[in-house]
Amino acid sequence: MKETDANEEGVSRTQTTANRSLAALIAAAGWIVPGLGHLLLGRWGRALIFFISVAGLSVMGYLMRGDVFPPHSGDPFGTLGFIADACSGVFYALARWLEAAGPDVSRAAGDYGTRFIAAAGVVNLLGVFDAYEIAVGRRD
Amino acid sequence: MVHLSHFWAMVSFAFLVSLGLAGLAQRDTLGRIKYLLWSFVLFIGVGVGIAWALYPFSR
């Protein structure tokens, strides 16, 4: 009896680890392409909403010539900005093409654009956490 | 290159962030629309309220 319980516990633990690994992959997919994590989980409505929200904020931020923080900015504010920007996944990688003219924060629009780009990353990060929680079964 | 006024930058930011939050917080379409509208109105209301409160200090 005790041996059966131990076996079941072992199987359950293995399944939990497998679920978490799969959930981590889904979360990573959602980070790289906003909404992809939800799409893989069959939540196409949520996937579309996150993609439109993150893409809209990113593209508008770049078109307003907002500042994109590089990985090694050298100060804590710049590092936080980089983390926020990088959370928008593929849109961070596309920054050099979407903002070919470079940032211009001498005008208010450029300063607003910086906030748009950072907000895109934060919204996508919330989406990544949501996809992970759904994948591990902690959220509907 | 986009030239948005302060107001339209605020409106577009409020809409896009509210859309993301509505998708996160609600499951059904009607709930999402209500949440989006409420969040959008709050964003704009708080933004205009802060701008109005700070206006005397801008001169």
Image (spheres, coloured by chain):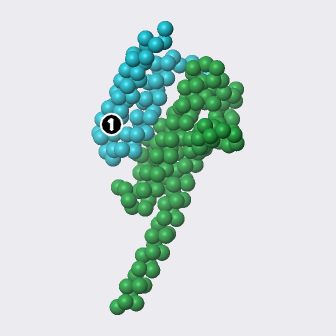
Chain colours: A green, B cyan
Q: What residue lies at 56% left-to-right and 34% top-to-bottom? A: A117
Camera-side residue: A116 or B16?
A: A116
Camera-side residue: B30 or A103?
A: A103
Q: What residue lies at 45% left-to-right and 80% top-to-bottom? A: A10
Name the residue carrying label 1.
B35
Q: Which quadrant of the figure has residue A73?
A: top right
Camera-side residue: A16 or A2?
A: A2
Give the image location of residue A138, x and y in percent: 38, 59
Q: Is residue A114 left or right of residue A73?
A: left
Q: Is residue A96 above or below residue A127?
A: above
Q: Residues within 10 Å of mark 1 (few under 14, many from 20)?
A: some
Q: Is residue A58 visible?
A: no
Q: What residue lies at 42% left-to-right and 84% top-to-bottom? A: A7
Camera-side residue: A37 or A139?
A: A139
Q: How many marks?
A: 1
Q: Is residue B46 above or below residue A96?
A: above
Give the image location of residue A85, x and y in percent: 59, 40
Q: What residue lies at 46% left-to-right and 47% top-to-bottom? A: A127
Q: Is residue B49 above or below residue A120?
A: above
Q: Is residue A68 visible?
A: yes
Give the image location of residue A65, x and y in percent: 62, 26
Amino acid type, residue under disc 1 in the picture: Tyr
Quadrant, the C terminus of chain A: bottom left
